[in-house]
Amino acid sequence: MRRVKEIVSTTELLRAWAGHLAAWRIPERILSGVDESPWVLPDEVFARRARHYLSAPGGPSYDRAMEALGQGGSVLDVGAGGGAACLPLASRTTALTVVDSHQSLLDDLVRRAAPLGLAPVAVCGTWPEAAAKVPEADVVLCHHVIYNAADLEPFVAALTRHARRRVIAELTVRHPLTELNPYWKRFHGLERPEGPTAAHVIEILEALGLEVKAEQWTRPAMAEYDSFATLVDVARRRLCLPLDRRDDVAEALRDAGVSEERPPDLGSSGRDLVTLWWPGEA
C-alpha cells in the first residue's frame, strides 16, 4: 500500500512540474503582435560567460566536478552552450563530449577548446533525444537546462545512466524568467508565474530515488553584454515589444536599477544559484 502512495506522489510531482512550465507560455494575443521570436538565445552571453569562467574558475559546481574527476576522467556536458561548465575542467578532462541544440554554440566551443588541448565530440540535439548518440562519461554536467525540461523524469534518468561517477546540475533558485516578471506587468499588465523552483527539482529527484545533495550560492555580478543597448534589445524581444519601444524598455531597466556598466542577461541564468549533485549509475 505504501508503494502505491509513493508512485502516486511522484506522478503528482512530475505533473505539477510540467504544469508550472506550461504556465510560461506567452498568450497568443501578445505573441501574434510581433515578428521576432521572444525565445532569444543570445550567443554573446554564452561566449562571455565561458571566457569569464576560463579566466577565473570557481564556485560549487566547479568544485564538485573537479572533486569527482580526481586525477582525471571523461566529461559529458549536456546543454553545453559556450563551454562555461566544461572547459574550466580541461586540466583533468581526458575526453569531452558536448551536447547542445545550437550548432553555432557548439562550433564556438570547439574552437575555444583547442588551445586547452581538448578536441570535443560535439552533438547537436536536445536531451534526452540525443542520449543514444553519446557515450557514457565519468562526470556528467547539466547547467541551466533543467527548467527547459517539461518531461523531467526521462531527462534526469538519461543523465544518471550516462554518468559513471557523478551528475552535477546547476540552476537558478527560481525559474530564470521570473526576473522579467515586473516588466511583463509594466508593459502588458500580465501576471507571470513565480515557479517552479530548485526546491521542486530537489523534491522530484528525491522522489525518483536519487541521493541528491544541494548547495545554494550567489554568483558574483558580471557584465554579460558588451553594452547596455544590447541588453535593452534582447529584453525588448523577450517582452514581445516592437522596435520603437526600445527607449521605454531602457527606461524600465534603469528604473529597476539594472547596471548600465555591467549589463546582466535578464531571463537567462541569474545570480542566485543552486548546485545539485548525485551519483551516476553507468
Image (spheres, rainbow, N blue to C red):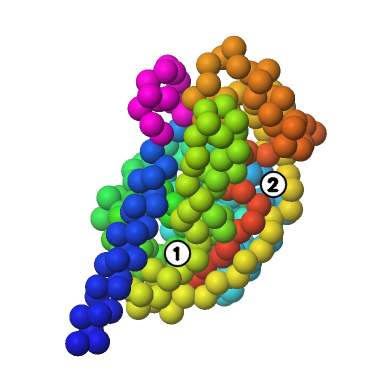
Q: Quadrant of the image for the N terminus?
A: bottom left
Find the magenta span and give its range.
26-38
From this view, report whether residue 277 is shown above or below residue 145: below
As helix, strand or loop, the secondary structure at mark 2 comes to: helix
Left/right of residue 164 with respect to residue 229 in the rendered view: left
For marks 1 and 2 on the same chain, the one whose residue lies earlier in the sequence: 2
Q: Is residue 192 visible?
A: yes
Residue at the farthest bottom position = 1
Q: Main secondary structure of the magenta part?
A: loop
Disc 2 marks a residue whose amino acid type is: His
Q: Which mark is residue 200?
A: 1
Residue at mark 2: 52
Measured as percent of width and height from the top left, residue 15 is found at 30, 59
Q: Residue furthest top?
A: 244
Q: Is residue 281 left or right of residue 178?
A: left
Q: Kindly report which numbered mark, 1 or 2, lies closer to the viewer in this rendering.
A: 1
**Does the CB distance between marks 1 and 2 fall below 8 Å?**
no
Give above or below for 218 relative to 244.
below
Where is the C terminus found, in terms of image quarters?
Answer: bottom left
The residue depicted at 69 percent of the width and 24 percent of the height is 250
Instruction: Name the residue: 42% across, 42% down.
Output: 24
Near mark 1 (Cα within 10 A), the count class, few <14, some 14-19 or many ≥20, is some
* Type of the residue with mark 1: His
Is 36 located above or below residue 208 in the figure?
A: above
Say whether residue 84 is left or right of residue 240: right
Above or below, 215 relative to 81: below
Q: Within the magenta stretch, is there residue 10?
A: no
Residue 241 drawn at (x, y percent): 53, 21
Q: Position of residue 126 (x, y in %)?
A: 34, 46
Q: Residue at x 44, y 18 (%)?
A: 34
